[in-house]
């Protein structure tokens, strides 16, 4: 495609000058090329995400490394592989949808990244799990073997400890995942949304209510409520 010629066509048809034609062109032409994954992939958009957290969300640059939202965002981007433009749009949406409650804002951010997920809990869990692996390899390579030799249940505990040592764990999605897992009492599998359709437990419902965007009467409606919120910005 000859981009210059295409831009001139836009200018001719819509009456824009060259600069405005270029801006208009950028609105509907977007190409994403998926490259082979590497161990350093989580860092690919590191500076972009940092810039957005400072310029859009208002965080101070020097404290981002200790901010759990920032690392959750990087974990989800590592899992989804969104383009730069998609990340920019997503962070702007997050700035409009967040409600000032860190626990729930953490879920808003996750749901925005996994808005098309068929199993929200599992996607979040695996994204955080894999990013924890990245953090361990980046900061403490001698611990890597111990991490990979442990079973899933032990890894969950290690994951919680890694995040607790670095961030404000009470408002992190990791704390929420840990509480859900404790209440489910399932030691052998990752957290999965269908579990809530199989188990009717008042403890689980009570926990989910404290993290829900609005009134919740059935535990298996939890993720649906969040999907509806990020689509409309209105609690259902």
Image (cartoon, grey):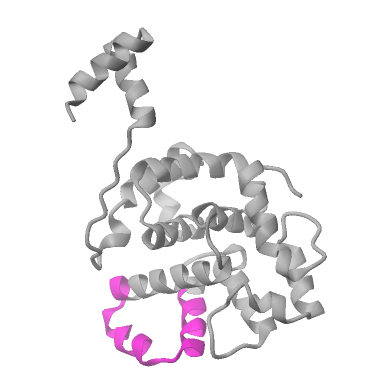
Up the image or down, 154 lies above or below 78; here it is below
Seen at 30% across and 88% down, the residue is: 145
Q: Is residue 24 visible?
A: yes
Give the residue drawn at x 38%, y 47%. 50
Report how many numbered discs are placed on residues in the image. Answer: 0
Foreground: 58 or 111?
111
Looking at the rendering, in which quadrant would you find the N terminus? top left
Question: Measured from the top left, where is residue 44 in percent x and y?
Answer: 28, 54
Q: Main secondary structure of the magenta part?
A: helix
Q: Residue farthest to the left?
A: 2
Task: Answer above or below: position of 178 versus 226.
Answer: below
Q: Does the segment drawn in magenta span residue 142?
A: yes
When asked about the image quadrant of residue 214, the answer is bottom right
Please indicate, yes or no, whether residue 100 appears anywhere in the rendered image: no
* Image coords of residue 216 (percent x, y): 79, 62
Q: Position of residue 203 (x, y in %)?
A: 78, 78
Residue 71 screen position, x and y as percent? 44, 60
Q: Residue at x 46, y 72 (%)?
A: 126
Q: Is residue 105 left or right of residue 48?
A: right
Specify the quadrant of the image occupied by residue 189.
Answer: bottom right
- In the image, taking residue 1 as reference, residue 50 lies left or right, namely right
Indicate the quadrant where residue 23 lies: top left
Magenta stretch encompasses residue 22: no
Q: Which residues are magenta?
A: 137-162
Q: Nearer the viewer, residue 96 or 81?
A: 81
């Amino acid at each position: 495609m000859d981009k210059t010629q295409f831009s001139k066509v836009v200018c001719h048809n819509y009456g824009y000058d060259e600069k405005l034609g270029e801006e208009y062109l950028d609105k509907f032409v977007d190409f994403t090329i998926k490259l082979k994954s590497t161990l350093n992939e989580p860092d690919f958009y590191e500076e972009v995400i940092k810039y957005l957290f400072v310029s859009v969300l208002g965080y101070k640059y020097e404290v981002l490394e200790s901010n759990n939202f920032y690392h959750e965002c990087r974990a989800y981007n590592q899992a989804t592989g969104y383009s730069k433009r998609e990340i920019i749009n997503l962070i702007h949406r997050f700035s409009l949808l967040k409600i000032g409650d860190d626990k729930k804002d953490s879920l808003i951010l996750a749901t925005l990244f996994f808005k098309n997920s068929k199993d929200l809990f599992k996607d979040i869990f695996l994204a955080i799990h894999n990013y924890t692996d990245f953090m361990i390899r980046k900061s403490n390579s001698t611990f890597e073997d111990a991490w990979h030799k442990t079973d899933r249940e032990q890894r969950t505990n290690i994951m919680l400890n890694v995040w607790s040592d670095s961030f404000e764990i009470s408002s992190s999605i990791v704390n929420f995942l840990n509480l859900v897992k404790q209440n489910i009492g399932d030691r052998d599998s990752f957290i999965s949304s269908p579990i809530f359709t199989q188990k009717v437990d008042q403890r689980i419902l009570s926990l989910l209510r404290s993290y829900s965007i609005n009134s919740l009467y059935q535990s298996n409606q939890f993720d649906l409520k969040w999907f509806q919120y990020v689509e409309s910005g209105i609690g259902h």
